[in-house]
Image (spheres, coloured by chain):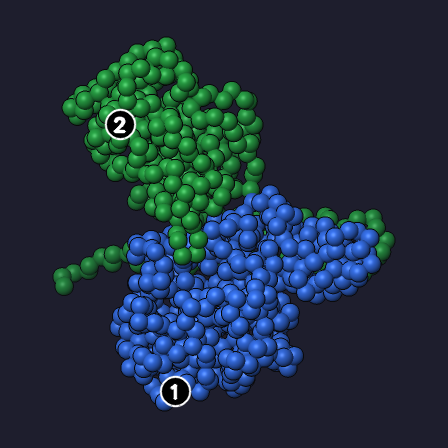
Amino acid sequence: MGHSKQQLLALLQELQIEFSQYEHPVVLTVEAQAKYVGNEGGGLSKNLFLKDKKNRFYIVSSLADTKVDLKVLSQRLGLGKGGVRMAPEEALGEILQVPLGCVTPFALVNESARDVSLLLDQGFKTQEHCFFHPLSNDMSISLNANGLDKFLKSIGREPSYVDLEANPAVGKDQPPDLASLVPSSSIVLPDQPEKQTSSQAPIDGNHVSADNKSKVVPAVKPSSNEKNTKGKPANNIPPSRPFADVDKFVEEIMHKTSTLLHSQIKEETIKQHGEQLGTVLSDNLRKNLGSDLKNLAMIFKNTAYTEGFHAGTHHQPKRIGSS
Amino acid sequence: MGTQEEPKIVGKEEEEEEEEEQVVNPWEVSAKDGGKIDYDKLIEKFGCGRLDRSHIERVERLTSRPAHVFLRRGIFFSHRDFNEILDAYERGDKYYLYTGRGPSSEALHLGHLIPFVFNKYLQDAFKVPIVIQLTDDEKFLWKNLTIEESRRLARENAKDIIACGFDISKTFIFADFDYVGGAFYKNMVEVAKRVTYNQAVGIFGFTGEDHIGKVSFPPVQAVPSFPSSFPHLFSGKENLRCLIPCAIDQDPYFRMTRDVAPRIGCHKPCMIYSSFFPALQGESGKMSASDPNSAIYVTDSAKDIKTKINKYAFSGGQDSIEKHRKLGANLEVDIPFKYLSFFLEDDAELEHIRKEYGAGRMLTGEVKQRLIEVLTELVERHRAARAAVTDEMVDAFMAVRPLPHMFD
């Protein structure tokens, strides 16, 4: 389970990070938060939880006044225009383990958020202190950017400060300047389909505030493919079996063949070809399925070879007798 | 001793698009006045041959199967000494393939796939091995990348390359940062010793401001043409010929290589060249990694493909339906038709579209619709294959290992 507000505050104290805490009724927007701590000086933070098309996640934490253009950010990350959008609601709970309206850099203390990239507004450094939610919307804590850095380093993160309003050219000779902040692992949420082609209604709408629009979450059977979900396990070899599984391979061939046959054997085609239907069908099969099946077979071959190669190169022959 | 052909000195910094001549070299491709590339002029200037029906028929005879779409449609259209390869093959002397990629970006678009698709066909049809070079060092030298990033991109690109369907028992993929050394490096230095600085300037357009990394790079791309660069694969086969299918802008490297080869006792590599894949916005448009709407990427969803083709593919159709029915479409500039000529396998269907669309009886929308179907299927198939590529598979493809069945 994720860390609680109490645990986080205790951690900050342990690290001897100076901070002030302010309790207030639950707030879901920066505007609401400002009502309670707006007069304490320092800067309020605006926090976005974003996701790209490859299921990689980002927290963008900025001063409330900083203008963040998602299109520009997307390009600077090397994801093209429109490569990032607001992450879906359930990601908040699953990955950051915080409630709605509570996106905060402190969420990175949770294991589930280890692959989330954090972009910090360089504007934070100009403020004496800045306000963030400590994993709960009924409190705000203010601390100096140095304190935030100390916290991040303690959980093994290097703080990355970025000029979020900058709009540098991105082109053939000017690679995206924030590309190194793209996480190396994607996080596939349990409910999400693993294929990229399935459409999903993105959440549009403003940043921290709760967007109560009901969202379509596609109901998808979990894929029979044993591919792992949250990131790659360090030492295990992800199973390649589905692609070198003889039964599955033959099943796929049969399936494609019978689908084609079904579509080709109809009243009209029977009438049209009569006795010749068999010849016509087998020609069609060869023509239409030939390359598809060859592709499948090549995948099978390469997978089986790889399995053997891997086993062979990791094999430690037992020494028999003395050397 | 200079190169036989006389390439024009191309100084990158000076050339602008408004210049008289078109510019074609490994780092820049632009047409005269922002128009189309003149391929006749290009191969005349470079001194390459044109592929014709007799070549294609010969290939079909030797491989006992129809020639690949790219050959039939003239996408691979130019060559150097392709006949020598075919002659040797007919005598029973096989050859090996060499191609490569400069991993400058993670996102691959359809244009990037073309040489790999063609090379896979050659591997299958002729039953020959292939070495695939990932020039991560080149990208580090020419672009604003760290070595770490270029190595990472090389591995990522390797996955898409593998997904094109290369046979692991006949394929060696290598990244320069991993492989340069040993016999490969010896050949690099042999080549380097035989190309003067002035020749390099003449071929590649280096200036006094270019750093020495760039100047010393060309041998890296030259030596995979020599079998002795791969002792774990070809030792004992020093006589093996090499065929290099790639885009025609790579010719400068191989003009240099072919010039040096006889002087170090090696066969000249043979070349087979493709024309350039046009951007969605048209021939004069630039396909750019930073403009996702200039190309179809292998990571595009079905929806993306539909949107991009419908919105951005440059149409050669007329402004109004009446005008279109009267005049027909301008197939010279029509992108959907051009893309179909690359990717629609069925010759009869393409011919039908050419006639009907050219005469104005078929509308742009229908052509686009068909293209969307074809591309979606292609991208889907690529993605499915890509999903099967594991890091272990990449390691295996890239392992320095013998390939005992490479000619089977």
Question: Badge 2, how many Cα within 10 Å: few under 14, some, many 20+?
Answer: some
Task: Identify the element where label 2 is drawn.
Answer: loop
Judge by depth and name the residue closer to the eye, B258 or A241.
B258
Amino acid type, label 2: Gln
Q: Is residue A274 above or below residue B72?
A: above
The chain under label 1 reads: B
Residue B152 in percent (x, y) is at 35, 53
Farthest residue in the left direction? A322
Mark 2 against mark 1, which lies toward the viewer?
2
Q: Colour of chain A?
A: green
Is residue A15 among what the camera can see?
yes
Kindly indicate the quadrant of the structure image that contains residue A58. Answer: top left
The chain under label 2 reads: A
> Disc 1 designates what residue?
B2
Amino acid type, label 1: Gly
Give the quarter of the figure containing the N terminus of chain B. Answer: bottom left
Left or right, B58 with respect to B253, comes to right
Residue A52 in percent (x, y) is at 45, 39
Left or right, A71 with respect to B360, comes to left
Residue A131 in percent (x, y) is at 30, 22
Q: Is residue A241 above or below residue B71?
A: above
Question: Residue at left 46%, top 58%?
Answer: B162
Q: Colour of chain B?
A: blue
> Disc 2 designates what residue?
A127
